[in-house]
Each structure stands twice: as C-alpha cells, then as structure tokens.
Image (cartoon, rainbow, N blue to C red):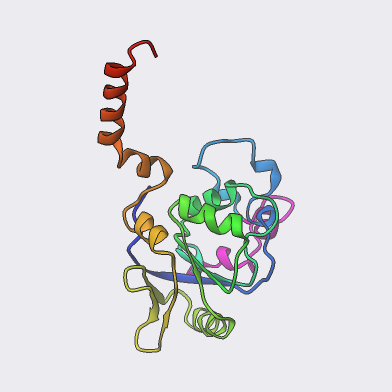
Amino acid sequence: MKPFRKLSAAAAPLPMINVDTDVIIPKQFLRTIKRSGLGKSAFFDIRYNEDGSEKPDFILNKPAYRNAEILITGANFGCGSSREHAPWALLDFGIRCVIAPSYSDIFYNNCFKNGILPVVLPQAQIDELTKEAEENPGAPIEVDLEKQVVTRGNKFSFPFEIDEFRKHCLMNGLDEIGLTLEKKTFIENFEKKQKEQKSWL
C-alpha cells in the first residue's frame, strides 16, 4: 500500500449528501476482485450518458478536475452496501483523500485499508473548502497527515482528528498484510519453537 504523508493536489467539489457505494461504483462492476481498472467506472451513472459519452457538467469530467486527488463532498459519504470496490474505484481514479462531514462506518474503515485518507471536518469548513475549489478550479489544497491539517496557502488552515493507529498505518503504507509482516520474525521464531516442542503437529 502506498504511504500517505502529505498531499498537495487539486480538489474536486461534489456537494452531495448520502452518496452511497452504488453511486461510487455501480453493482454491474463488482464482478472483478482486482483493485485496478475500476477508476473508469467510478460514479458511472452520474458521470456518463446512456450512450457512454461523458456528461460535461459532472465535476470529474471538467478539465480542471480530471486529475483531482482530493474529493470534497457531503455528509454520510459511502453509505449503502459495504462493497470494498468503492474505495478501489476512487483510488484507481486517482483520489487519495476524501473530505466530508461524516462517512458510513464501513466505507470509512475500508478507506484506511486501501491507502485513502478520509478527513472529517465540520460542515462550515466543508462549505469553505467547496467554495474555494469551485472559485479556483485546479488550485492545490494541501492535506498534511503528520500535522493533521488541511490548508490552502494563507487562506485557511483546518485541523482534523484521526486515530493514532490508523495514522501510523497510512503514513507507513501498512494494510492488514503489512501489519502482519511487521511481526515476521516473531512468527518465524514461534513456528520454529512449535516444531521443536511439538514435532507431531
């Protein structure tokens, strides 16, 4: 998993509440177990017309936001089913950080497992970030995980809270497999001792 420490990137404003996982990645794209290739189908139903052409008014289809790595959105983001394909699709599109007032618990947890930082900020600060992203398309916003702050030049600085263990995992690029491999020496020593003491196992 790619570590997340500091990100300075364009932010795309998506001021919608209750964006569920079927909006993020519709059910017809859940056949794969690969984490790559889903970005082109992210937000499929609101991003494309029925003939497959792009909807020019959708935020991520606009030139200034096509390469956005930060998504600013509304409350209860990622609600609905627990599909892990939702953060896979966002990450494959290029989104490394989502900023919202609240999230579905399962989606929130899945973000950390896949290298996406879900920042929680008060609605008033979300509104200010949204306005900034709309008025200055493509202008970078900085998210510093180590300092736990979202900044935009000298315009604003918004601190955010995050669990220390999750912060450690993101900053060091550790998913559940990575955390297990940190204990590799302990595991190998335990297995060696088991074979010596209980050779019949």
Decide: is 38 above or below 164: above
Residue 156 in the image, given as x and y percentages of width and height: 41, 87
Q: Give the range drawn in magenta.
A: 43-64
Q: Which of 154 and 196 is in front in this view?
A: 196
Q: In this view, does 199 lie to the left or right of 114?
A: left
* Residue at point 64%, 35% (across, down): 31
* Residue at point 63%, 58% (across, down): 54
* Residue at point 42%, 44% (across, down): 176
Q: Is 53 colored magenta in this rendering?
A: yes
Q: Is 51 colored magenta in this rendering?
A: yes
Image mark count? 0
Which residue, as the protein is rendered here, is positioned at the far front? 197
Which residue, as the protein is rendered here, is positioned at the far right? 50
The quarter of the image holding the C terminus is top left
Q: In this view, does 108 lie to the left or right of 160?
A: right
Q: Can residue 39 be seen in this view?
A: no
Residue 153 in the image, given as x and y percentages of width and height: 35, 84
Which residue, as the protein is rendered here, is positioned at the far bottom? 155
Residue 127 in the image, given as x and y percentages of width and height: 57, 83
Q: Is residue 19 left or right of residue 5?
A: right
Decide: is 124 above or below 69: below
Q: Is residue 77 visible?
A: yes
* Residue at point 65%, 59% (across, down): 47
Residue 63 in the image, given as x and y percentages of width and height: 50, 67
